[in-house]
Image: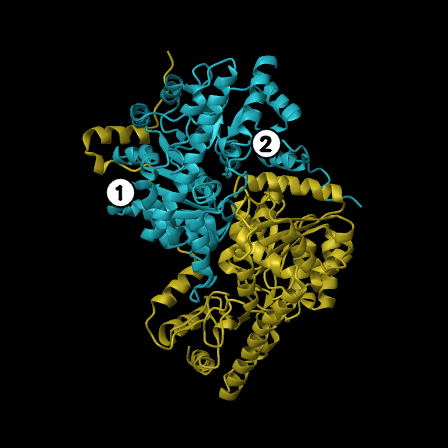
Chain colours: A yellow, B cyan
Amino acid sequence: MTFTSTPPALRLQQISNHLADKNTTASVFESVKEAPADVIFALTSSYKADTYPQKVNLGVGAYRTEEGRPWVLPVVKKADRILVNDENLDHEYLPILGSDAFRKASSKLILGANSKALAEGRVGSAQCISGTGAVYTGAHFLSKHYPIKGAACYISKPTWANHRAIFEGVGIPVLEYPYWDPATKGLDLKGMLGTMQSAPNGSIFLLHPCAHNPTGVDPTPEQWRQIADVMEAKGHFTFFDCAYQGFASGSLDKDAYSVRYFVERGFELFVAQSFSKNFGLYSERAGNLTIVARTPEVKNRVESQIAKAQRAVISNPPAYGSRVVSVVLNDEKLYAEWETNLSTMANRIIDMRKVLYDELTRLGTPGKWNHIVDQIGMFSFTGLTTPQVKVLKEKYHVYLTDNGRISMAGLNSKNVKYFAQAVDDVVRNH
Amino acid sequence: MASVFENVTAAPADIIFALTADYKADPNPSKVNLGVGAYRTEEGKPWVLPVVHKADHIMVDDENLDHEYLPILGLENFRKASAKLILGADSKAIAEGRVGAAQCISGTGAVYAGAHFLSKHYPFKSAACYISKPTWANHRAIFEGVGIPVLEYPYWDAETKGLDLQGMLGAMEAAPSGSIFLLHPCAHNPTGVDPTPDQWKQIADVMESKGHFTFFDTAYQGFASGSLDKDAYSVRYFVERGFEMFIAQSFSKNFGLYSERAGNLTIVARTPEIKNKIESQIAKAQRAVISNPPAYGSRVVSLVLNDETLYKEWEGNLSTMANRIISMRQALFDELKNLGTPGTWNHIVDQIGMFSFTGLTTPQVKVLKEKYHVYLTDNGRISMAGLNTKNVKYFAQAVDDVVRNH
């Protein structure tokens, strides 16, 4: 006779069941702990709940108009009408790797239409759940197939808050490389290259091709060359996370410089692409993982493994967002209109940088503020401290992340003076 | 120069998607696709539900709609309406505030989110998840993907072409207490065989006495009998019995929104406090995989579920689909009877939902594919929606041939 021993916890639960009435039965999830709320989403919630009329939201990286409102790109509205009126469109499952037209257009966008790697058939792709999904998918693939077991992924210090969680979530250890230099408020290239040199060969490095989040500090072409030299010498794996192509300088090609340079140098690499910001399609989760492999054959094998993994997590990706992007990227006129919409957003942000800088200069706010105009993309790493950020929140109802990062898109001509004054106060007095 | 991915092996293509690819590539004019579980009209075409078209036009004209990020757990109105749909508007558990929900990437994403949570927080470490034999091909991959061992419980009785209840209950009895059991509330995929209310009671009795965890996967609510409430019977019964549970819900089939990935994980917990803690952990995990779910599909579903007139129209569209499938079952059965095809074929009309487990063998399936250009999965499962008045005779004749001669 064999006995199956009942786990003590369950046995106690059973006894408790017998003794108590149903409603006081213990839960099988009794010991589950409360997870802390996500920092960024919590910030937005606090802002929404705040009734103060002059409140300012400089938290989440979503574009806002001069009127402080979300902006559905006119070209996206056009695409919507095209889609809704297309009698031939249905909602049949996409392939596991997503819409073919979308994937091709996405890879072409980041690598360039005349990319040799594309012509050589060694570029693969997988449609993913926006940038997060693309980073996750690439990370998950590496966790299963990267040949250097135990390799760590190095992320910049600082970086997007979610990078660590994604890699640790798939079991890849995470370490940091220096990036932000608080003294110069610029790039700590020496520190960055030093860590790349000392990291074990074949480590994974997560790089921001442009519009670094949260610092807004990007390497120059010469600095990218030095980075590529070390990456090559050490045999490290390049994983680009690109959420702002077109948003940084306003030029899609210019913003893709670093990725294209690395491809030209002969690197194999992953590029996670998000269309949340540059298409304003945040909630529709349009994203792509571009895969540059040594050969078409390797590319096919990598894609097949990614498809296998995706099937057991999402099965296949959502069509709507990818259809909008695909319609636009594959139509000459709509593409040109999109570039204009992009410039509108990028330029308003560049204007706000200038206006904020001018205000701080006018107020004579202590410290140097060039970084406001030198930094690139949606964010500015102000250099404000966590205690100063607290005062901004509590005294001025200005919401930003504890690391002093502000989303420039949250500023407009109506609140920029108010914000500058608040900064001036906390710098002088807190 | 060598590739860092030199040693990556090619993964085999997904069976169902490969089947569809083969079908598409086949130039034979009489070809029939009975593979993937997607609804087809009498004309053999996909069907965008009229009520979905309506919702689309409402949304495209709504100046107030933007594409701002949803919360991590998704659209609140969608989550509430989804939980209400499966548990019933008068659900006491909902009234008691102990029902949680997470918007997920359709049914797959909901099963994944629940499985991932269990892999991290289920108190019985090394508990296995038991799946029915057979079940949807992807169930095993999802649970194994998050590191939960997978075992099977008997389900399909090849002799009676019905439910092997004794085998099922026996496996539940023998499994270590506190195991996880993945149950299909209705329209079992692939067999189409569902337990009766009395059988559900027996299942619940054993699940309760063994302290097993109930994980329902419902992809066909409304599609099985045509009635949303009737199809939810087993879930509501289990809630009434006092079970905590997860319910993965897909809106792919019953809204025809396949590619838009509208799904929900409903969580029935002992207390509101525990529900909150579970949701917080699911949000934390989701943030590192998808960040937040896609809005479009959930907006369509939410619009419809929360509007009385649209809801009614949706029920009408659902009945259209369910009834056409039921009539195809009858037509196929009648054809096989006319032909005097050897064997009993009652199971064609007795089985419920989108699929029929024909009982055909893998060699017979091969002949159907190669000789007749009829595409179905090797286990003999056919998607009834692929049949229509133009091809049902052809298919019946093909079945008759393979049963007699192969």
CB under 8 Å between discs 1 and 2: no
Disc 1 is attached to a residue of which chain? B
In-image side of B364 versus B304 (left or right): right
Say which mark, if any, is on residue B32.
Answer: 2
- Answer above or below: position of A152 versus A349: above
The spot of residue B305 in percent (x, y) is: 36, 50
Residue found at x 66% / y 59% = A330
Residue that carries the numbered disc 1 in the rendered image: B93
Q: CA distance from mark 1 to mark 2?
A: 45 Å
Residue found at x 57% / y 54% = A322
> Which amino acid type is marked by label 1?
Ala
Query: Quadrant location of the C terminus of chain A?
Result: bottom left
The spot of residue A23 in percent (x, y) is: 22, 38
Residue A25 location, quadrant: top left
Indicate the secondary structure of the residue bearing disc 1. Answer: helix
Q: Which residue ends up furthest to the top in the rendered image?
A: A1
- Answer above or below: position of B399 versus A408: above
Disc 2 is attached to a residue of which chain? B
The spot of residue A293 in percent (x, y) is: 72, 47
In-image side of A268 versus A214 (left or right): right
Q: Is residue B166 visible?
A: yes
The spot of residue B119 in percent (x, y) is: 45, 38
Say which mark, if any, is on residue A430.
Answer: none
- Answer above or below: position of A209 versus B95: below
- Give the foreground label among 1 and 2: 2
B23, B105: nearer the viewer: B23
B401, A398: nearer the viewer: B401
Q: Residues within 10 Å of mark 1 (few under 14, many from 20)?
A: many
